[in-house]
Amino acid sequence: MSEIRISQAQIQSDSDMAGGESGAQTAEHEVSAVRKFLMARGNSAIADRVFHGLMVLCALSIFLIVALILWLLIARSQLSWHTFGLKFFYRSFANPETGQSMYWDPVNDRFSAVPFVYGTLVTSFLALLFAVPLAVGVAVFLTEMCPRWLRGPLAFLTELLAAIPSVIYGLWAIFVLVPLLREHVNPVLIGALGWTGLFDNQNPTGLGFFASGVILAIMILPIVSSLTREVMTAVPHSQREAVLALGATRWEMIRMGVLRNARIGIVGAIILGLGRALGETMAVTMVIGNTAEVHRSLLANGSSMAAVIANEFTEAVSDMHLSALIEIGLALFIVTVIVNAFAQLMVWAVTRGTPSQVR
Amino acid sequence: MRALTDHAVTVLAILATLIVVTPLLVIFGYLVYKGASSLNVAFFTQTPKPVGETSGGMANAILGSALVLALASFIGVPIGIGGGVYLAEFGRGTKLANAVRFTADVLNGVPSIVMGLAAYSLVVIPQHHFSAFAGGVALGIMMIPTVCRTTEEMLLMVPHAVREAALGLGVPNWRSVLSISVKTASPGIITGCMLAFARVAGETAPLLFTALGNQFWSMNLNEPIAALPLQIYVYALSPYDDWHRLAWGGALVLIILIVLAVSLVRWVTSRGVLKGAS
């Protein structure tokens, strides 16, 4: 019972924090009337208009940036696009000397993005697999179970986890995570699940898809959990009380009263996490192994779209190589914009009315 | 049975929280343990030594980072604040404002490496060489959405009565926005800028093929320049213990900067930014 009161107070203070937005709605009309009167007085009308125009320009520059990125990447990837077409994303080709099929051949200027798309998908999927249950668990704990004094520090800690730069995760992964996986985790996986073909013992380094998936999971956890928390807090309190009044236990209340109402937002949070995982560069580059190959085994080396750009861009000499890398970047840009827009809409659908935190 | 499930879920949730908090503590602990031993005066005053010679530092990388970040702030902060002012003061509830807010959030999720590619195409290709300037442009663009959204949020916290009071005194609208709204919210806006600053301070990917990195002192914005995260990346992948040591030191310096910024933001927002106003 005391629990409910606490979270009710929380909600109350949250809506106060919103700058009294709902209360401001009515006041806003009056303000704009006053503004109109003052602006019509003339002496400051020009300055006002100039100022207004400047601010609009700043706001519009955000559209401009998106358009500029799109245009630049399209313009610089023309060469590769005209040479390889759509096959760039799904076809391999035969090596002229050996006849074996291959994907990435900078020497002969022939490129295909297949291994990188594959690597990006596999690592992101692994990351979601590890991160989502944990993130939802943390969000449930923080919003519904956690004693109040612990809530602030824990939220702060997850926030810090989000603020650590990618390169530091990579550094830590190289010297701590990868040796740990190599010595202790991978042998167990090979022993227990080797028969599935997903874990073989060809790669003794500990680098590869699996290590990348684990570090990515750690990196996207904070954003998924903090968004899920936000969405769950936005569920009206009456829902919880109604379910509790029917005699539900706390878990049943969470399941029926909270999770069910927040599910669209939670899916949105997960997709937003996916967007982050898709484009994450440095940490993945440092632990994925960087080979342009497609392997079934999760313990094998590979590469991802972002990793190949980071790794080869400064060393690319031919125009075709550069162009192919930029085309991969363009694909990454378009995919992440779509994924993010989609996720944002889903989160907004649930938290509408409560202002979102800046991430 | 139902009670049992309830308890099981509680235990699971606590377990999940522990699993999430553990890596954070491990990463921090390891960072401090490894980093503290490699921080000394030389770290902050010397440039990297050739392989084989011990000691040496990252002074040029710290200076380079500072230069690039100053340039980035110069680009990102004014535009970001302007956008935020528009969202909070002029465009409230309009379709344009919603579209801008939406695009800013989407832009925030665009991978940093793509920003690097864009800056490369925009600055490096026309100039025909890598430069600190290109790095600044890449990071500056990345700062805009964050600054814009925090500014908006902070301005929304300014009570309406304050604005009405100013307008009631016959202050022109632009003065009221600048001297009343923005000024009241300025602690919040400044910390928002610091947050954006700290965030791009750790970015490596956009600098890889813009600022490129440099082993020597450089103050020239037109030339490749060293940057702390770049140096960490290069040293982490090198096979030399001495360079690994420097990488850990650099990582510790970066993380201290970032933790400070994040804590400050949290402190300011939880204390209520607008003490004088309400």
Image: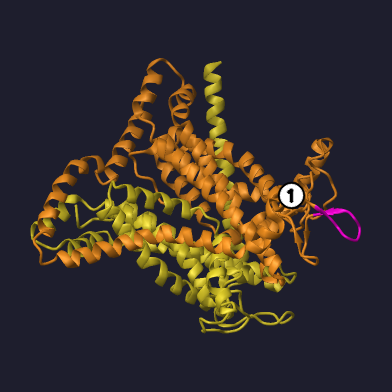
Chain colours: A orange, B yellow
**The residue stretch that appears in magenta:** A93-102
Is residue B36 in view from this perspective? no
Tell me the residue that label 1 is attached to: A181
- Residue A157 appears in the rendering: yes
Secondary structure of the residue carrying tag 1 is helix
Q: Residues within 10 Å of mark 1 (few under 14, many from 20)?
A: many
Image spot of residue A182 (x, y percent): 77, 51
Hey, what amino acid is under mark 1?
Answer: Leu
Residue nearer the viewer, A183 or A305:
A305
Q: Is residue B86 left or right of residue A306?
A: left
Confirm whether the magenta stretch covers residue A101.
yes
- Could you say where residue A336 lies in the image, as x and y percent from the top left? 55, 50
Q: Is residue A322 shown left or right of residue B12?
A: right
Q: In which quarter of the image is the N terminus of chain B?
A: top right
Nearest the viewer among B246 and A297 is A297
Q: In this view, does B44 lie above or below A241?
A: below
Q: Which secondary structure dominates the residues rendered in magenta?
A: loop
Chain under numbered label 1: A
Q: Residue at x 46, y 20 (%)?
A: A249
Q: Position of residue A233 (x, y in %)?
A: 40, 36
Looking at the image, which residue sits at the far right?
A98
Q: Nearer the viewer, residue B223 or A133?
A: B223
Residue at the location (36% across, 56% down)? B150
